[in-house]
Amino acid sequence: MNKQTISGFIRDYLHHKLNEKQKAQLETWYLLKAEENKSVEMPIAYEKLEAKIWNKIIADVSQTTQELPKVQKLKQSYRRIISIGIAASLILIAGIGYLVLKNNANTPDRFVIAKKYDLPAGTDKATLTLSDGKVIDLNKDAVGKIAAEAGIEITRSVDGTLVYKALNTGKSAGFNTITTPIGGQYAVILPDGSKVWLNAGSSLKYPTAFAENGREVALTGEGYFEVAHREGPKGRVPFSVTVVKNQTPSERVEVLGTHFNINAYADEPFINTTLLIGSVKVALNNNKAALLKPGQTARLSNENIKVQQADTEMAVAWKNGEFVFREDLRSAMRKVARWYDVEIIYDETAPEDLMLGGWMSRGTNISEVLNHIQLTGKVHFKLEGRRVIVSK
């Protein structure tokens, strides 16, 4: 962050105007200043180190802010953060475009993933399987019309989104399936105008034309939905999602609103349905059901539904091109594995219960993510091809 951005964040922090992400960015900036001023060879007493860091912070912002008399409040706030032991994990919050990890002389070599072993982030790629069995690689086709079948035309927009358009030919509808690989993501606008974003390792099956009395799709993996309102002869046409986990239909989401996220990966312990706008009804095969309000998550476990307050930022971070880590290490590494197409291997020393907190861009190479997590000082990564070895 430049000086003007820093001073603006400090000013807004003091007036309680920062949102959670901005607070995280400011806290990370402060803690990375601490990291820059550490001396591995000659440790400095805590009080002297804190004073040295804070003097550098004041020097950084002194030319652009009028709030320095109040800035001690911020210092006290961070002293409390550090004192309760979460300072190291907050370093994870550094994001591309905001902070850059400086590999200076004081950074231990074991905390640096060499660039020659680096892996790029995932990209927009998927395959489309038509009703006749034909498979189209959406990573290679040019923008424009890519297929036509069963009375619909399928095109790719300039931003890569798959778009369906009805041709009103009277032909019966078939089913298409869009599938994203590990390390891929894609978005599709369905025949009714609803838009669905698919995360890595996911699939969506849907008809090429919806019936007048209902709209039904099936999801595996993770998807974010923005459902279009549609009126039929008998009123509003319902939209429902059958959620499939481990090749078994696990729940049905009946949409009464518009914006929601479903996470149903086979390697996750729960199916989480998170509502942002509108309302949805989550129903199980055993007739148990729950109605969600915005800001709530329905967590499915052992054929039971638990409704709880949602961390909506974390739930939809992937769709917004971000990692948000407010979870345990192994949960975070499952996200990393899917996006970078790597295998995670834990050796006998790997921490079992390390909790993380922070965010990063999903557009950066894997080394940036791993290097920042390592700054907790409680975990170490070794990258071997497409294997990430995790140790203490």
Image (spheres, helix red, strand yellow):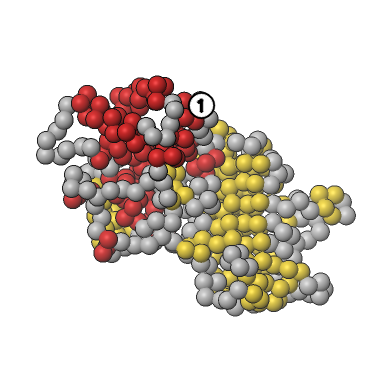
Quarter of the image where the N terminus is located:
top left
Left or right of 356? Residue 210 is: right
Residue sitting at x 57%, y 53%: 223
Whether residue 327 is visible, yes or no, is: no
Left or right of 306? Residue 206 is: right
From this view, report whether residue 87 is shown above or below residue 161. Answer: above
Q: Amino acid at mark 1?
A: His
Determine which quarter of the picture holds residue 77: top left
Query: How far across and down, in percent of the image, does residue 308 sit?
Result: 55, 33
Quarter of the image where the C terminus is located:
top left
Left or right of 64? Residue 229 is: right
Query: How far across and down, in percent of the image, does residue 105 sit?
Result: 18, 48
* Residue furthest to the left: 41
Determine which quarter of the picture holds residue 194: bottom right
Left or right of 169? Residue 54 is: left
From this view, report whether residue 67 is shown above or below residue 126. Answer: above
Question: In front here: 356 or 81?
Answer: 81
From this view, report whether residue 338 is shown above or below residue 281. Answer: below
Residue sitting at x 58%, y 76%: 142
Question: In front here: 118 or 241?
Answer: 118
From this view, report whether residue 113 is shown above or below residue 166. Answer: above
**Disc 1 packing (10 Å; few <14; some 14–19; many ≥20):** few
Query: How far across and down, in percent of the image, does residue 10 sit?
Result: 44, 31
Query: How far across and down, in percent of the image, does residue 262 sit?
Result: 57, 48
Local SS, label 1:
loop
Identify residue for label 1: 16
Residue sitting at x 80%, y 56%: 213
